[in-house]
């Protein structure tokens, strides 16, 4: 066991109360890694562990979180702040900084607990954490956590010793973040999947819950967006703008648009796909690109974001926030902005 693994083991052994958190609008990788770590701490280590997520959990992933005692900070801020204040250790998962935790950010930063980052995004904020386990050449935070847990002395590199709930959660999160092995797959990703299946994880059940359990609304919305809303620029950029009016029309739930951004890349002439989802004063941005185009550079330069080379995200503001001017004057300017900046990015003009 190397020094960092040993430090983590010792800190867990001496901890009393642990808090586990992740980024806003938690996806499968965030939820899977948080719950995977929670069950390891509680079942294997006999420790107290509380998962606190900033906001609403996606309904389509309810098979993962139903029955779990998760504090949603936007719904119960007092409980969230109290748990953080009492924590000996805080684990930040699937986000390179506490600024990914929205209203929890300052509480997390100021807490006196020992802080651990486990992530797979670029540019971890090293000054915020006491110890960091982060690599951008893994498929997901679930994969990073999987190999981290194998190094712990209780597991001794034997996946069968992981709690069943941990193994299931990690397989689920890795599956969603790779789009079922369609992107960001490395040799260790396939090794992880093979070892977890050998250890007893029911992958067929996970796939059924992730991909074959949506409401009809999602498919009605998907067809509408592809037929009526999607535009493709002469430079080969497909973009879809989902506004709140359409959200209401199709009764969209959190998480139901996951994966939509990937679909246009199936079109031969499309080299980049951008999905804009209206939120309060801004659009959430998801970007996917073919291998020779850096989606992460696009996210950093134009959308206050970041991510992986071919899968990234950020925000596009159309209202003033914290005294800063918006990126565009109104949400109606989003299409023109996308066409302008993608042409500039791809063509240098």
Image (cartoon, grey):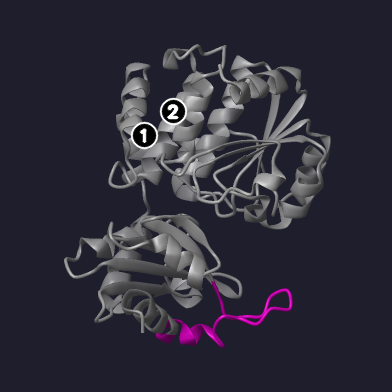
Q: Relative to the observer, which residue lies in front, 228 or 114?
A: 114
**Residue 114 % position (x, y):** 75, 33
Give left or right: position of 292 versus 113.
Answer: left
Identify which residue is drawn at 57% across, 48% down: 95
Q: Relative to the observer, which residue lies in front, 315 or 55?
A: 315
* Label tally: 2
- Checking the image for residue 124, the label placed there is none
Sequence order check, earlier mark of 2 and 1: 2
In the image, residue 336 above or below residue 292:
below
Residue that carries the numbered disc 2 in the rendered image:
168
Please tell me how crowded label 1 is: few (under 14), some (14-19), or many (20+) other residues with Cα within 10 Å.
some
Q: Are marks 2 and 1 in contact (CB under 8 Å)?
A: yes
Look at the image and tell me whether residue 47 can be seen: no
Is residue 194 located in the magenta-colored stretch of the structure? no
Q: Quadrant of the rendered structure where residue 200 is?
A: top left
Give the CA separation, mark 2 to mark 1: 8 Å
Identify which residue is drawn at 32% across, 40% down: 185
Q: Name the image quarter holding the C terminus.
A: bottom left
**Residue 1 % position (x, y):** 55, 16
Residue range (magenta): 316-336
Q: Quadrant of the rendered structure where residue 17 is?
A: top right
Please tell me how crowded label 2 is: few (under 14), some (14-19), or many (20+) other residues with Cα within 10 Å.
many
Residue that carries the numbered disc 1 in the rendered image:
206
Give left or right: position of 342 versus 43.
Answer: left
In the image, residue 336 above or below residue 135:
below
**Residue 193 % position (x, y):** 34, 28
Which element type, helix, strand or loop, lies under badge 2? helix
Which element type, helix, strand or loop, lies under badge 1? helix
**Residue 243 % position (x, y):** 47, 75
Identify which residue is drawn at 39% across, 62% down: 295
């Amino acid at each position: 066991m190397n020094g960092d693994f040993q430090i983590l083991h010792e800190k867990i052994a001496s901890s009393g109360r642990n808090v586990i958190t992740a980024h806003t609008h938690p996806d499968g990788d965030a939820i899977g890694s948080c719950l995977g770590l929670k069950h390891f701490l509680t079942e294997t280590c006999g420790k107290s562990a509380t998962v606190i997520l900033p906001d609403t959990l996606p309904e389509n992933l309810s098979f993962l979180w139903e029955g779990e005692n998760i504090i949603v900070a936007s719904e119960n801020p007092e409980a969230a702040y109290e748990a953080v204040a009492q924590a000996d250790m805080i684990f930040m998962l699937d986000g390179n900084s506490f600024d990914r935790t929205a209203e929890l950010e300052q509480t997390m930063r100021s807490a006196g607990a020992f802080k651990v980052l486990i992530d797979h995004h670029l540019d971890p904020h090293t000054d915020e954490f006491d110890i960091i386990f982060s690599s951008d050449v893994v498929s997901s935070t679930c994969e990073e956590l999987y190999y981290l847990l194998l190094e712990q002395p209780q597991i001794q590199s034997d996946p069968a010793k992981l709690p069943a709930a941990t193994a299931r959660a990690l397989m689920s999160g890795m599956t969603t973040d790779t789009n079922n092995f369609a992107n960001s797959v490395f040799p260790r990703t396939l090794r992880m999947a093979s070892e977890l299946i050998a250890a007893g994880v029911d992958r067929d059940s996970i796939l059924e819950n992730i991909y074959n359990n949506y409401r009809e609304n999602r498919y009605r919305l998907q067809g509408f967006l592809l037929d009526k809303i999607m535009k493709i620029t002469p430079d080969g950029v497909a973009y879809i703008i989902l506004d709140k009016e359409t959200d209401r029309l199709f009764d969209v739930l959190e998480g139901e648009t996951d994966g939509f951004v990937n679909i246009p890349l199936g079109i031969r002439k499309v080299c980049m796909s951008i999905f804009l989802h209206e939120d309060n004063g801004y659009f959430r941005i998801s970007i996917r690109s073919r291998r020779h185009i850096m989606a992460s550079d696009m996210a950093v330069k134009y959308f206050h974001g970041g991510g992986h080379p071919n899968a990234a995200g950020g925000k596009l503001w159309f209202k003033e926030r914290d005294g800063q001017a918006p990126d565009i004057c109104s949400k109606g300017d989003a299409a023109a902005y996308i066409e302008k900046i993608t042409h500039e990015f791809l063509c240098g003009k």
